[in-house]
Image (spheres, rainbow, N blue to C red):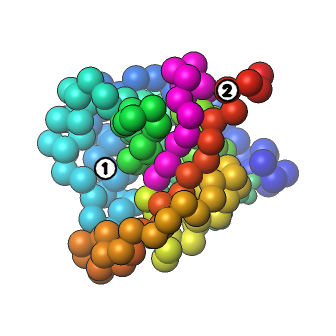
């Protein structure tokens, strides 16, 4: 974390996402993605046994979230977002560290995700977490027809 970010970092609590969080999560989602998931998509994913959702709380409210699927021994990271006014304060990093801790505990080999090539901020964020390009998935995003970059990072099961 840079000195500026460290100065601004805030204390957060990460806990399981519940159906009661869907409203707050959806508000962040709508402000963060050009084609946001609907409320009911979050609600239905939370009920699936292979999906996991967590929220980051700060100052008494939900300020970020992560949602992923356990799939064939890997984690498919489907969503990570932080409320705009709380970005660059280390919350995304905390969520990502939490995800890798969970993956390691579960004996998961790798974490992968899709990202838009145009999402420069997210690209830098993932680079920071040592994700690398696995392959390109053409025509992935329905709004622009943009391809997705599929990024992957192995989970170091030995470390720590
Ligand atoms: C990507 C996202 C989750 C990052 O959350 P965040 O809380 O702002 O991230 P952090 O503060 O923990 O950043 C950690 C590091 O990642 C990098 N980083 C994060 N956002 C960045 C940006 N917009 N531009 C450049 N680097 C960035 C920096 O190296 C940063 O460290 P620094 O602040 O010390 O320089 C947030 O920008 C977001 O919600 N974006 C919209 C949703 C989205 O695009 N999600 C990913 C979809 S694939």
Which residue occupies the foreground of this view, 100 or 6? 100
- Magenta span covers which residues? 101-113
- What is the x, y in percent for residue 111? 53, 42
Which residue occupies the foreground of this view, 54 or 153? 153
Q: Is residue 29 above or below residue 14?
A: below
Residue drawn 46% across and 52% down?
Answer: 113
Answer left or right for 154 relative to 81: right
Which residue is identified by label 1? 27
- What is the x, y in percent for residue 19? 23, 28
- What is the x, y in percent for residue 51? 32, 31
Q: Is residue 30 above or below residue 70?
A: below
Residue drawn 74% across and 51% down?
Answer: 5
Q: Residues within 10 Å of mark 2 (few under 14, many from 20)?
A: some
Q: Secondary structure at mark 2?
A: loop
Q: From this viewpoint, which residue is outermost toward the front?
A: 72
Q: Quadrant of ligand 1?
A: bottom right
Residue 110, magenta (yes or no): yes
Answer left or right for 15 relative to 121: left
Residue drawn 39% across and 35% down?
Answer: 72
Which residue is identified by label 2? 157
- What is the x, y in percent for residue 18? 29, 25
Where, by quadrant of the figure, is residue 12 drawn? top right
Q: Is the CB of mark 2 within 8 Å of ligand 1?
A: no
Residue drawn 49% across and 48% down?
Answer: 112
Where, by quadrant of the figure, is residue 32 drawn? bottom left
Q: Residues within 10 Å of mark 1 (few under 14, many from 20)?
A: some
Q: Is residue 104 above or below residue 39?
A: above
Q: Nearer the viewer, mark 2 or mark 1?
A: 2
């Amino acid at each position: 974390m840079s000195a500026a970010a460290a100065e601004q970092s805030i204390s957060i609590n990460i806990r399981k996402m519940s159906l009661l969080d869907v409203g707050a999560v959806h508000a962040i989602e709508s402000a963060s993605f050009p084609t946001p998931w609907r409320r009911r998509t979050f609600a239905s994913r939370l009920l699936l046994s292979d999906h996991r959702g967590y929220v980051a709380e700060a100052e008494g409210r939900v300020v970020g979230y992560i949602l992923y699927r356990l799939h064939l021994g890997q984690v498919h990271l489907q969503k990570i977002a932080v409320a705009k006014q709380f970005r660059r304060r280390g919350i995304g990093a905390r969520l990502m560290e939490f995800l890798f801790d969970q993956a390691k505990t579960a004996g998961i080999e790798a974490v992968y995700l899709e990202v838009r090539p145009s999402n420069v901020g997210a690209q830098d964020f993932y680079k920071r977490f040592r994700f690398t390009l696995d392959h390109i998935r053409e025509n992935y995003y329905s709004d622009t027809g943009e391809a997705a970059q599929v990024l992957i990072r192995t989970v170091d099961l030995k470390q720590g």
